[in-house]
Amino acid sequence: MRLRNVPGAREEIAASKYVVLDDAETKGKWNEIFGNTHPIQIEIGMGKGTFIMEMAQRHPEINFVGIEKYSSVLVRALEKLEAINNEKEEKGESTINNLLLFRMDAENIENYFAKDEVSDIFLNFSDPWPKDRHAKRRLTSDRFLARYINLMKKTGTITFKTDNTDLFNFSVETANEEGWTFLKKTDDLHHSEYNEGNIMTEYEKKFSEMGNKIHMMQIIQ
Ligand code: SAM
């Protein structure tokens, strides 16, 4: 994700009803925040949010939280969500009301979600952190997998997509070492049995158009 300062991004997101900031007390309160008892699925590192907005529209029976570290990126997702909802309002359709955008660094995720509060996690085209000394920062490292266990229901799944073969191999190896069970695993998602219903992310579109294969795994505790 290209990072540049977007003037006014912080102010714009702070004023929006669709956004939660990292100074909010959310732990154990997500169902209260959404105002229903629906299950909660999260995407960590949503970028501009194409994937999670489509998920929210396809699954009104689920609450979604799109997590993004940078205000400058989150503001782009926010603008898109507002545009979709404005258009829906004009057409007299019901708006997306089962999605919140959360500006937060996933390093601190355990401070914001309680045990069993999250049903499923999506990691799409996570930053690869290729240097060995940065391996702990990868969102599929053992450190992060341990954090996810502290938030997720026992039946919860983690679905991870990337075109980066080294990161994928690292993630498969780590999940194996940490005792996770594989529900799905493919080196070429778009030509696999799992492609039906797949929602492409921004990065997925870009990299598959360049001819890169998309790897995918889905794991459960
Ligand atoms: N998921 C989107 C997609 O597939 O098109 C965006 C992928 S982009 C390569 C990775 C995104 O994850 C960036 O927007 C980055 O800011 C965000 N990110 C990276 N590390 C993060 C962290 N620790 N917590 C929250 N977001 C993070």
Image (cartoon, grey):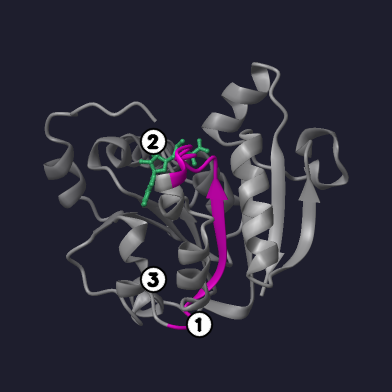
Using residue 178 as the reference point, say whether residue 70 is left or right of it: left
> What's the CA distance linking mark 1 and mark 3?
16 Å
Q: Nearer the viewer, mark 1 or mark 3?
A: 1
Residue at 36% x, 58% y: name it.
Answer: 106
- Residue 24 magenta: no
Identify residue type, mark 2: Lys
Q: Which of marks 1 and 2 is in front?
A: 1
Query: In the rendered image, which residue does mark 3 sit on?
Result: 34
- Name the element at disc 2: helix
Q: Which of 184 and 100 is in front in this view?
A: 184
- For residue 141, above or below residue 74: below
Identify residue type, mark 1: Asp
Q: Which of 116 and 20 is in front in this view?
A: 116
Q: Is mark 1 within 8 Å of ligand 1?
A: no
Q: Give the range drawn in magenta.
A: 115-132
Query: In the rendered image, which residue does mark 1 sit on?
Result: 116
Query: In the rendered image, which residue does mark 2 sit on?
Result: 80
- Name the element at disc 1: loop
- Of the image marks 1 and 2, the number of the one nearer the N terminus: 2
Q: From this viewpoint, which residue is outermost toward the right?
A: 193
The spot of residue 101 in percent (x, y) is 35, 53
- Of the image marks 2 and 3, the number of the one nearer the N terminus: 3
> What's the CA distance linking mark 2 and mark 3?
20 Å
The spot of residue 209 in percent (x, y) is 66, 18
- For residue 215, above or below residue 64: above
Question: Quarter of the image containing the C terminus?
Answer: bottom right
Q: Does the residue labelled 2 lie within 8 Å of ligand 1?
A: no
Residue 15 can be seen, yes or no: no
Q: Mark 2 and 3 residues: CB-CB less than 8 Å, in contact?
A: no
Residue at 54% x, 30% y: name it.
Answer: 203
Mark 2 neighbour class, 10 Å CA radius: few under 14, some 14 to 19, many 20 or more: some
